[in-house]
Amino acid sequence: MTGRHTYPAARLHEWLHDAREHTLRLVSDLSDEQLSVPLMEVVNPFRWELGHVAFFYDVFLLRALGAERFLLDGAERLYDSFNVDHDDRWALALPSREQTLAYMRRVTQRVLARLEAGDPDTSESYLYMLAILHEDMHAEAFTYMRQTLEYARPQSAAGADRSRSAHGGGGPLPGDVEIPAATFHLGATRDAPFVFDNEKWAHPVEVAPFRMARAPVTNAQFAQFVDDRGYLRPELWSHQGWRWRERNGVQHPCYWMRDGTGWSRRHFDRLEALEPHAPVVHVNWYEAQAYCAWAHRRLPSEAEWELAASAEPTPDGRGITARKRRYPWGDEPPTPERGNLDARCEGCVDVGAFAAGDSAFGCRQMLGNVWEWTAAAFYPFPGYVVDAPYREYSAPWFGYRKVLKGGAWATRSRLANNTYRNFFQPYRRDIFAGFRTCALDDGASRYASG
C-alpha cells in the first residue's frame, strides 16, 4: 500500500461529496430506458456501473477497515469486475434504479460516519483516496459512454460554463520547443501525496535531446491527413493498425462527418462544425501513429512526455535541474485558469488556450483538454510491487495497452498530475484521447501549423 500522506477528514468529506454529486449528475437526466444500454465492448450497463462504484467503497474501504459484511446482500456476485465478465453484466438480475441509488446512499453514509470519528492515518487516507479517485475515473467513463451512445451532453455543475467559446480563444499554437538531453527520473517521487502502484518509483532514464510540439495536433492538422487519403495508404500504417482499419472500414476519425462545406463532428447528440484549432479527439493509437508517419513526425516516449511536462531547464538551457514539478506549471494544484479539467467547458477548447498552464519548456495543455497517446506500451517500472488492497488495478493489463498522459476535459483535477499513467487498448476511440508529436531526428517534416 502506498500511503505517505494524511488527509484531513474535512477534505475527504468534501471530495467524497463532490465525487458522488458529479457521478449522480451524469445519470440523473437519463430515462430508465437509456440506462439499459445495448451490449457493447466499450460501455457497461449504467446501473451496473453505479453499483460497482458503491461496491468499490464497500470492499476496498469499509471491508478493508474491518466491516464484516457488504451493505447489499450479494454485492460481490454482481459488482466484482474481476469475477463478473463484461458481457455477463447484461444478464444479471441487477437491483432497480431506486435500489441501486439506495445502496450508494448506505455506503456513503457509512463512509462519512467513519470520517466523523476524526482524521484518518496514512493507511486509511490512502484507502479513502483510492475509492474517491476510482469514482472519478468512472465519472469520466460515464461521460464518454454518453458520447458513445449519442446521449445529450451531461447536466452542468453549479457555476460551470457550458459555453466552450468563453474559454476557447487562443487559436492554434504552432511550433516545437527544444528540450535538452538529460538523465530524467521517470515516475512518482516518494514524497508524492498519493501514488498508484504503476507510478512507483522515479528511476533514472537517459533521454536524448528532442523537439516536441508546443500543443496537441489540431482538427485542422488532422483534416489535412484525412484529405490526403491518409486512411487509404497502407504505407502510413503499422501492420496491426492497417488490419484494424480494414476490418472496421475506418476512413476518418470517430464522429466526423463530411457535409457540403467541410467536416462536422458529433458532440454528444448534436452535430457541430469541426473546430479547426481544437485538438483532434476520439482517435486511437493506430490513427495517431499513421498521422505521425504522414507528417514525418513521431509520438513521444513516456519519458519524453513526462520530462517536457515536469522538468525545469538549467539557466544555460543545456540540461535540467534536479527539481521535478508535480504539474506542468509547478506544484500548486490545478485551477480553472491552468487547464480544461473537471468538465467545466464540457468539451475541448482551442489548443492555444490556458497559457497559465504551460510547462517550464513552453508546452501547453499537458494537463486537460485531451489525453495524449505516447509511444510507450504499458509496462511496470523497475521494482514494481502490487499495491494492496486493489491488486488488479495495473498488473492484469501490462503489455496489452498503451500509455496515455495528461488528462482530458472530463478528467477530475484531483486525479491529473504529471506522473499519472492512463492505459487503454490501442484500438480504443471512444475515450477523450488525442496526441502531440515530436520531430524526427533527421528534421524532415510536413507538420502543418494550422
Image (cartoon, helix red, strand yellow):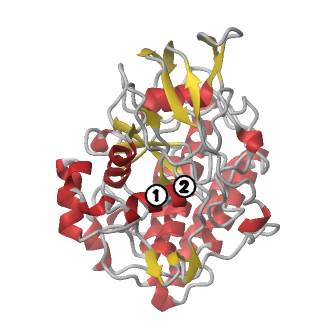
Q: Are marks 2 and 1 in contact (CB under 8 Å)?
A: yes
* Residue at 47%, 40% in the rendered image: 437
Tell me which amino acid carries mark 2.
Thr
Front-most of residues 247 and 367: 247
Q: Is residue 117 something that shows in the picture? A: no
Tell me which amino acid carries mark 1.
Phe
Left or right: 190 with respect to 168? left
Where is mark 1, residue-wise?
222
To which quarter of the image does residue 429 belong? bottom left
Front-most of residues 24 and 311: 311
Q: Is residue 228 something that shows in the picture? A: yes
* Residue at 74%, 71% in the rendered image: 162
* Residue at 76%, 60% in the rendered image: 167
Q: Position of residue 275 (x, y in %)?
A: 60, 67
Q: CA distance from mark 2 to mark 1?
A: 6 Å
**Residue farthest to the right, as pictured:** 159
State the count of labels: 2
Q: Position of residue 180 (x, y in %)?
A: 54, 16
Residue 305 position (above or below residue 268): above
Q: Position of residue 57 (x, y in %)?
A: 53, 55
